Image (cartoon, helix red, strand yellow):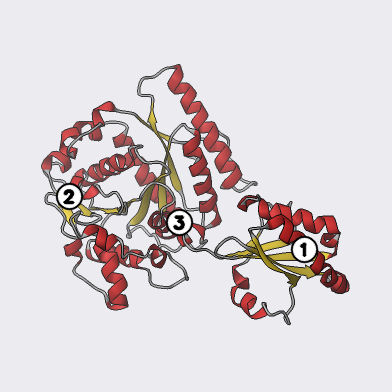
Amino acid sequence: MIHFQDVLPAAREVIAATGVDAKLDGVLVLRDLRGRVRFFLQPRESEKARVTAACDFLQDEFEKKLAPFWGGVVEVDDSRSEFATVLAQVRQDAVAVEPQSDFPGWSIIERHVAKSAWTSDIHQPPWPLKPQTPAIIAWYSHKGGVGRSTALCATAIHFARAGKRVCVVDLDLESPGLGSLLSNTAPTCGVLDYLLERMLAGHSFSPDIEAYLTRQSDAVLIGDAGEPVICVPAGCIDQWYIEKLARLDYELLAVHDSGAPNPLADLLTQLKRDVDPFVILVDCRAGFHELGGTAVQQVSHANVLFGLDSRQSWDGLRCLVSRLARGSTTPCLLVQAMEERAPGPRRDDARDRFLQSAYDVFCDEYYDEDDVPDIGAPGELHNPFHIPLDTRLAGFQSLADVTEILLDKPYSELANRIVTLQNRAMNYAP
């Protein structure tokens, strides 16, 4: 039984075994919604007849070796083909098959059922980042339980105490929680309501944004002269929440076309216009969730990526960093979370492993091969910020219970790094 990832290498071997590969300028692959592949061979002009004659043999070989992923079509890529009209509509979506050294001249058109935000190369923040505009900063982790949301709240509190207006958006719709932390009262509406109503009402949707907001103004958190933290919670977790969630089509929330309206971008734009924050911090659901993909890959100006010193974490982060590099290489801050609190050999070893893993991933997937920094270079994207495991934060009921911890290091230093990240994102802006 062949597996998805083995289909193209197996097809290449079949073509090479026939000698047809030497007669081709390229191969166009069309992979459908279920993963079935069809091949459109692009022969040199003098070899067109020979390649056409070989298609029947290739058909039989592909049927034997690629099933159940065989789509039943191998033919010369020709304007007279019955697939010509279909290909004309999607040919612009073709990308090179990687690694190109193994698949010279091969390109592929991928069709997807879901995860458009993760597979798209469109990076389109709702506004260009300038000194007078807020940065959209997405906070992401491949695995949950790494302290991401707590660190985000701590950063928001530091900015608020400095008199800066901060807006926090909870995109973890399946497991919401920020609304209860960053609110004086229970939320009645939130992100889920805004997105659902925007998708129903269309482009004319222009509600009072206050209906979707909560505020945290506890002086214990923000100080006597601080700015209240503004939060767009996921929503009100009541008997209607799952009914609303069940009607949200995440595919419609991905940015599909440059310039096309997008419900999440509309929410962020309205926050910018009506709330006028210093920064917008977006908390994403862990893993490759559609809404997190829209935030991290498509609408953010910068990202904060939380990782652990573990194989699980690095498998996910490598995939994410590779995807980010395909877009506009949005700047990011890498955080090594849950590390040993006490100094010593165990912590030193974990830091060394994490740094080496980060360097390998960013060199392989992100950095330009002509501009690779040294592994120890300070301030580079692979050089992580460290947040130790603090058992005092386990099971806290409110942020007020742990304010002293959140105002101390490393969270005070993290807030400064977020300002640096925002400035870096401004330098990246076109």
Marks 3 and 2, how far apart at CA = 30 Å
Question: What amino acid does circle 1 point to?
Answer: Asp
Residue 378 in the image: state x and y as whole percent.
49, 35
Asked if 52 appears above or below 118 in the picture, the reply is below
Q: Nearer the viewer, mark 1 or mark 2?
A: 1
**Relative to the observer, which residue lies in front, 205 or 247?**
247
**Relative to the observer, which residue lies in front, 228 or 361?**
361
Q: Quadrant of residue 195?
A: bottom left
Q: Name which residue lies at 29% across and 70% down.
A: 198
Considering only order in the chain, which callout, 2 or 1, is on the residue closer to the N terminus?
1
Residue 248 in the image: state x and y as whole percent.
33, 64
Q: Nearer the viewer, mark 3 or mark 2?
A: 3
Residue 271 in the image: state x and y as whole percent.
26, 62
Instruction: Judge from the rendering whether residue 5 lies leftward or rightward of residue 136; answer left or right.
Output: right
Q: Nearer the viewer, mark 3 or mark 1?
A: 1
Q: Are marks 3 and 1 in contact (CB under 8 Å)?
A: no
Q: Quadrant of residue 66?
A: bottom right
Q: Which mark is residue 227?
A: 2
Residue 125 in the image: state x and y as whole percent.
41, 62
Instruction: Judge from the rendering whether residue 193 lies leftward or rightward of residue 26; answer left or right.
Output: left
Label 3 crowd bin: few (<14), some (14–19), many (20+), radius 10 Å: many
**Relative to the observer, which residue lies in front, 301 or 174?**
174
